[in-house]
Structures are given as C-alpha cells and as structure tokens.
Amino acid sequence: MKRTLALVAFGLLLGFGIALVYGGSGLFQRIAAFPLSLLGVALAMIFACWNCNAGRLRLMLGGIARPMGHGRALATMMATEFAINMTPAGSGGVLSYVYLLKRHGAPATSAAAMYAVDIMMDMLVFSSALVIVALVLFFHPAQLHIGWEIGMLAGLLVAMVALGWAGAKNYRTVLLWIGRRKLIRRVSAANRRRLTRTVLRFREALHLVLGFSRARLFGIFLCCLGHWVLRYSVLYVIITGMDRHVDLAYSFLVQMLAQTAGHFTMLPGGSGGVELSFTALLAPVLDHATLGAVLLMWRFALYYWYLIACAPVFFLFVGKALWQLLGNSAPAK
C-alpha cells in the first residue's frame, strides 16, 4: 500500500512540476481568470461520463440475468475508475471490476468477459473517432502535419484488435503455450488444469456477452460513445474558457495520443508521459502560460478529480482488503 501511495505522490509531483516548468508563474494568472462556471460544466461532464459507464454496465448485466440498480452501477464504475487511476497502467481496474461484480452475484469469468467487451467497445469508438479525424484532416490540408499521429494511433489500434482476435481464434494454441510455460515453472498439474478451465469458462462467457441482441449491443456502444465524447470534450471546454481556440477534432487526437503515451510510463494515471505528450502536441497552438494552465486544469478534471471524488466510493463499496491487494500487486519501480 505504501508503495502505491508513493507512486501516486511521485506522479502527482511530476505532473505538477512539468506544468509549472513549462507554464511558469503566468499559468496561475491564467487559472485565476478561468470562469468557475465552466469548471462546473467540465466536472458535470465527468459525472455524466460515469453515468454513461453505469448505463453500459447495467445493459451487460441485464443480458446475463443479473440486473443492477443505477445507483449501485454508478458506485461500481466510480470505484473501478479510482482503482484504474491509482495503479500503474490501470492494472487495478479489472481486479476491482471483477471483485464488485462477484459480490453482486455474477461469475468471475462473466465479469472478466464483460470487462473485455468494455475494452473492445472502447477500441471501436477510438477507431470510429480516428476515421472522423482523418476526414476532417482531409478537408483541412493545413493540418496535414498531424498525419503521422493518426497513423501511429491507427497502427496501435489495429495491432491490439488483431492480437485479441488471433488469441480468441487460436485459444487452444495459447492454452498449450501457457501450459508449457507453467510446466517449466513446475506448477502442479492441478493448478494447470484449473487455469485451463478458467480460460475456457472465460471464452464461453465472452461468447455469451457477444451473443447479446443487436439492440443491446448497440445500446452498450451508444453508452460507450457518450462516455468518450463527453470525456474528450472537456479539453475543448477548458481551452475555450481560456479564450483560445483549438479544433475539436485535434483536441480529441491530442488526448488519445497523450493517454496512450501515459501507459508506457508505468506510473498511476500515466503521469509524466501524459503531460509531456500533451505539451508537445499543443505547444504549436498555445502560448506557454496558457498551455501550462490548460494542462493543470485538464489533469484536474480527468485525473485528480477522479481520485478525489471516487476515493470515498471505493473505500465504502470495496473496502480496505482490496486496497491492500491493489497495493501489493503494483510492480516495483
């Protein structure tokens, strides 16, 4: 637990330090001039994001005959968001998600399959967003300099989807490979059989979730789309409040790239990688003081606020035991 808190504290100091060094003392004047009403709008959009996630959770649980009320679904997603933002690369998210759904009565394999479908829906939304951004780029030749960014993101998305598809199609080969690896490590035959059964149950649960009606799957996609549109529109609201203008499509691309880069730092919330990528991509269109202020306010809305608002929900619904488990599972630096 202490190691996790130390990583979070280091990440917070690193992120704040990057904003301060880049923006200088002028960033505080820019923040002071920002309308509080727009900050309220940004935080309301984040709350709406959590409700969209609660909606898609309810749709998936309803598909496996485990209905959940909206209040509990909202608490589940807020607790999961806290775990994602408190652990390196969001590794604690799936653990909290599965734990909370098991307490609700859903099998662990079904919960894991639902989490996998969540990720697949996210990839589908990101792919759709890239197509739209590419079309905007086509009609605005002056922005051709961001073509490499679109290409990089598209390559990452295609690679992730291809890897997932190959793993699902050739699951027997994957199981045999895992079995050989476990045999090398002298894991007992009983444990290897248990792992094999778990993977097979997960595959069956994944087929069950993906076998939902088209209407239910479309509803899940719409909730997912609403979440990401609202979340990635926060930056546009903040920049507008600073009396500056950046194309909405470009602001989406900046956030997608910054969040992707943040996963490689292996720090909670992607600290360091997110801030450096963010400043590099917006430096050509914003002055230093404004960029530093925008960075701090954007990170407050999409990271610090998640920690502040979701922490009480996490400890109320999950408790200290899982928090300690998350802390022990964090990789050492």
Image: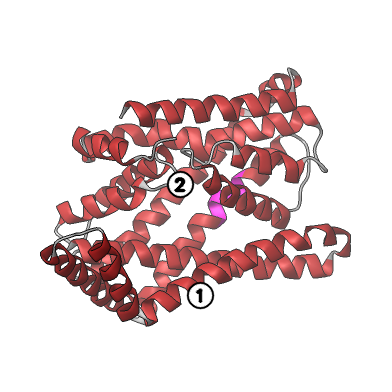
Secondary structure, magenta segment, majority class: helix
Return the mark for residue 162. Answer: 1
Please tell me whether residue 247 belongs to the stretch shown in magenta. Answer: no
Tell me the crowding category of disc 2: few under 14, some 14 to 19, or many 20 or more residues within 10 angstroms, Cα based: many
- Which SS class for mark 1? helix
Three-letter code, disc 2: Ala
Residue drawn at x 69%, y 51% is 251
Residue drawn at x 48%, y 38% is 267
Return the mark for residue 21. Answer: none
Q: Quadrant of residue 278?
A: top right
Q: Quadrant of residue 21?
A: top right
Q: Nearer the viewer, residue 243 or 141?
A: 141
Q: Nearer the viewer, residue 182 or 87?
A: 182
Kindly identify which residue carries mark 2.
89
Q: Position of residue 328 (x, y in %)?
A: 28, 37
Three-letter code, disc 1: Ala
Q: Quadrant of the C terminus?
A: top left
Q: Position of residue 84 (x, y in %)?
A: 40, 45
Q: Nearer the viewer, residue 190 or 219?
A: 190
Q: Is residue 219 toward the left or the right of residue 130 in the image?
A: left
- Which SS class for mark 2? loop
Q: Is residue 182 toward the left or the right of residue 193 in the image?
A: right
Residue numbers of the magenta segment: 229-234
Q: Position of residue 102 (x, y in %)?
A: 17, 55
Q: Is residue 166 toward the left or the right of residue 256 in the image?
A: left
Q: Quadrant of the N terminus?
A: top left
Query: What's the distance in space between the residues labelled 2 and 1, CA to CA?
Result: 21 Å
Q: Quadrant of residue 180?
A: bottom left
